[in-house]
Amino acid sequence: MTAGHLAQSSSLAGVIVRCMECSADFPGDRALTGCPACGGLLDVVTPLSAIDRALFGTGLTGAMAHSGVWRYWPLLPAIPREAVVSRWEGNTPLYEDARLADYAGMNGEVRIKHEGHNPTASFKDRGMTVGVSHAKAIGARIVACASTGNTSASLASYASSGGLASLVLIPDTKVSMGKLAQTVAYGSTVVQVAGDFDAALAVLRELTAAYDVYLVNSVNPFRLEGQKTIIIEAMEQYAWNPPDYIVLPGGNLGNTSAFGKALIELVEIGLIPRAPKLVVVQAEGASPFAKWFRNGYRDYAPMHADTVATAIKIGNPASIPRAKRAVDFTGGIVTSVSDEEILDAKAEIDRIGIGCEPASAASLAGLRQLVAAGQIPASASAVCVLTGHVLKDTDAVSDYHFSDRDGHPRPGANRPIRVEPTLAALERTLADALHG
Ligand code: F0G
């Protein structure tokens, strides 16, 4: 599972990765995406005894000094600074709006951590700054991913910023044009694979095992280190007093894994008194993890994925064992929601002026479902993580507002009104608004 024969760098000498299955340790100066001994998933080892929160944000220069990821460098792998590629990622807002709690059926506080405010408009930038920097540090020339669109947009941007070539494999099922446009514009080589995301990732793993091509999909433990900072930053914004629940969408389950690792570490070093429960929400048509969870973790079965939330249209998530560890550590819940529940929750998030792409809205839809089912108390506090920006998928917006569901406009559909170009016509059309 080593990527080809990439040069090993002595500058990463202190960094260790550990297999979560057999606990074997390996040096962090190579491109490992699985344990060379048993094939298990790997974690970067964080030297927790040395962490001092007073060091957060200190001693950084250049772009790193502005990054909401590198700010937490004591909890991140010690990558040589000259290799770091940063685009001032992170520093995302933590919104509060009472209408979110109303929608979820709650009287407790509901907040939104909006990862669409990253440089390429999704949470992927947090992992990419660490993944691409690690690739540079070990001398990789080509970085690659399979993607439903956001990882590829982020990879393309970071690779080009750092002077590396990038290769992207996309499925030939629907990928948002906006995400593909970013990837092409930032200069990646894009290959469309005749198959779904799972097929694209499988064939890319074969390629990266055989050639000097560095894989940045979330099986790469360095990428997850960057994604940990969504949680670290959120907890700092909560002044280290966590809410009861953290709710996020689940696709390939890299983010779930990263959130779990962050929470384990924050509890261990005493930065937070307890771990909030992780709630992972999948789309019903792409919900192998939710099915497995509901089945008491018996008989795991991948599935053929189908959902309107193309970002999480994944039937065989690569990080299942790490995601299970995360959910179990926090006493969390895994559930799934229908496409219509996702779209209605998205319309609500959009309408209050915040906005997100469909996959992101699975979080609020899942929260609402679990409150209605009595699995989450209405008085609890929760933060929903929105993973991508509303402009990532404009087709989803126009489909929702401009086309009917079962012969009727959807709830809250907002259609442009066509008028003749005269003042009289405008006055007639807007009479209620103008005089109301
Ligand atoms: N939300 C968005 C907007 C995503 O793009 C993704 C994953 C997820 C949620 C799920 O995160 O895979 O860590 O569970 N997108 C990947 C991609 C698969 O290729 O862009 P996950």
Image (cartoon, rainbow, N blue to C red):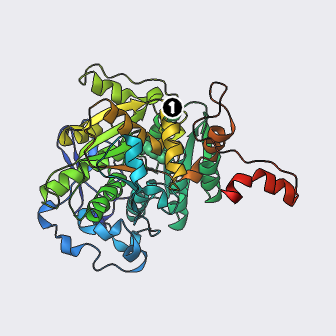
Q: What residue lies at 47% left-to-right and 61% top-to-bottom?
A: 118
Q: Residue at x 24, y 42 (%)?
A: 326
Q: Which residue is outermost to the top? A: 299
> Relative to 225, is 402 on the left or the right?
right
Residue sticking out furthest to the front: 435
Placement of the N terminus among the 4 image quadrants: top left
Mark 1 — residue?
Answer: 339
| Structural crowding at the residue carrying mark 1, measured as other residues with C-alpha within 10 Å and reported as few (<14), some (14–19) or many (≥20) | many
x and y percentages locating residue 230 in the rendered image: 34, 57
Rendering coords of residue 140 (x, y %): 44, 58
Q: Foreground residue, 281 or 123?
A: 281
Residue 385 is left or right of residue 154, and the answer is left
> Which quarter of the rendering shows the C terminus?
bottom right
**Image point (61%, 36%), residue name:** 174
For the question of whether residue 12 can be seen, the reply is yes
* Above or below, comparing residue 17 to residue 200 in the picture: below
Residue 416 image point, x, y percent = 73, 48
411 on left or right of 240: right
Q: Quadrant of residue 138?
A: bottom left
